Each structure stands twice: as structure tokens, then as C-alpha cells.
Image (tube, rainbow, N blue to C red):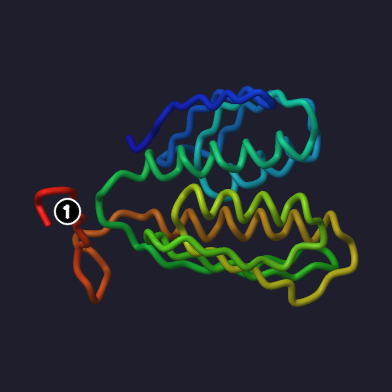
Amino acid sequence: MRETKIGRKTKETDIQLRLGLDGSGHAEIETNEQFLRHMLDTLTRYAGFDLELAATGDNDHHLVEDVAIALGTAFREALGDGPVERIASAMVPMDDALVTVSVDIIDRPYCDVDCPDVLYTHFFRSFAMSSGITLHGIVHRGMDDHHIIEATFKALGTALRHAVVRRESVLSTKDAVSLRRGDQC
């Protein structure tokens, strides 16, 4: 099982989470930020991950940002070093909204996501940077901000579910990348 348990505590937030990538889409989320809870539950279900999360914070911005950082860090740890499909995209309709998300699980963090709420734009960026993935999100259409944001979380979950599928070999023109430190250079 690819899973990890981490904690992140700062002056502003206290977060404990367990993430399993080979799960069933089960989420147990304890936080006072209701929309964040809804979006994390959505992401977890569509990704097929299992998530246990307890998070408190002094305000919504700090809470959303730090949960994204903790979740991205946990994702990276749980994934490990084994080869995966790596690249995936998903297009999701939700009522008036139509959103595409594409990911590349590679140690080249980047994020460019259309999002009508700066707080959740920040969530996606913080998740991408802490997990080390490349993340793009395009809103093709939509009028309701809730629908656009939720469709983005659904598309991200679906893309991640496909990207983390195990492979026999590394999918890269560079083959496996190894780092040398200190006197090994």
C-alpha cells in the first residue's frame, strides 16, 4: 500500500492526515471550513484515495493553504519512487461548468489553474508546489463559481487516479533521474 501519515503544525494551523493512494475513495475530514471539507471529499472520491484529515486554523486562508501543503507533501511521500503512468488529463462537466485538468507527476512543480476564487487558486498552487507535480486547469465554460471549483477538484482527482497507476518501467526520455550530493559530484 502506498500510504503515509504526516502532521504539520505552525503558529497558524494544526494538521494531521493519513493518505492512502491505493484506496477506495473514503474520506474522514474534520475541519470547520465547510467548503474545504466538501472539496477534499470530492477530490478523494474521484482520485480513489483514502484520506483521514483533522485540521484547525486561525483563518480560512491559512487553513486552506496549509492543508494543501500537507496534502501535497503526503501525496509525494505516499507515491514513493516506483514508476507510474505519470501524465493524465480529465475533462469534467458539472452543470454549467466544463473544466479540464492535466497533471504530470514529475519533480518539476508548476501550476497554472483557471479558478474564480483566489483562495482555491492558492490551494491548487500550494498542492502542486509541495507535491512536485505539474498541474494545469482550464475552465472551458461556467457561470457558477461553486460548480467551476468543484468540477476542477473532480477533474484533478480523476487525473491523479490515472496518473498514479503503477508501470513496469519509467516513462521518460531521461530515464530515471538520480541526484548526487556533496562529494559524489
Q: Image height check: is 156 above or below 99?
A: above
Closer to us: 160 or 46: 160
Q: Is residue 179 visible?
A: yes
Please, is residue 139 above or below residue 68 in the view?
Answer: below
Horizontal relation, residue 96 to residue 75: left or right? right
The reply to whether residue 54 is in sight is no
Q: Could you say where residue 27 lies in the image, as x and y percent from the top left?
A: 60, 32
Q: Mark 1 sits on what residue?
A: 180
Residue at disc 1, secondary structure:
loop
Task: Give percent across and percent down for residue 61.
Answer: 76, 40
Q: Give the x, y percent position of residue 13.
A: 66, 26
The residue at 36%/45% (across/down) is 79
Q: Which quadrant holds residue 174?
A: bottom left
Q: Amino acid at mark 1?
A: Arg
- How many other residues sit within 10 Å of disc 1, few (<14), some (14-19) or many (≥20)? few
Task: Find residue 125 and report its horizontal and vertical position in percent.
Answer: 61, 55
Q: Quarter of the image containing the C terminus?
A: bottom left
**In the image, 153: left or right of 143?**
left
Q: Residue furthest left?
A: 184
Relative vertical location of residue 9 with respect to residue 161 in this rendering, above or below = above
Q: Is residue 157 left or right of residue 175?
A: right
In which quadrant of the rendered image does the N terminus lie? Answer: top left
Q: Is residue 52 above or below residue 101?
A: above
**185 vs 19, nearest the viewer:** 185
> How many callouts does the rendering have?
1
**Picture residue at 72% right of the left edge, 59% below the top:** 151
> Residue lying farthest front?
183
Q: Say which of 70 and 9 sits in front.
A: 9
Q: Nearest the camera: 122 or 102?
A: 122
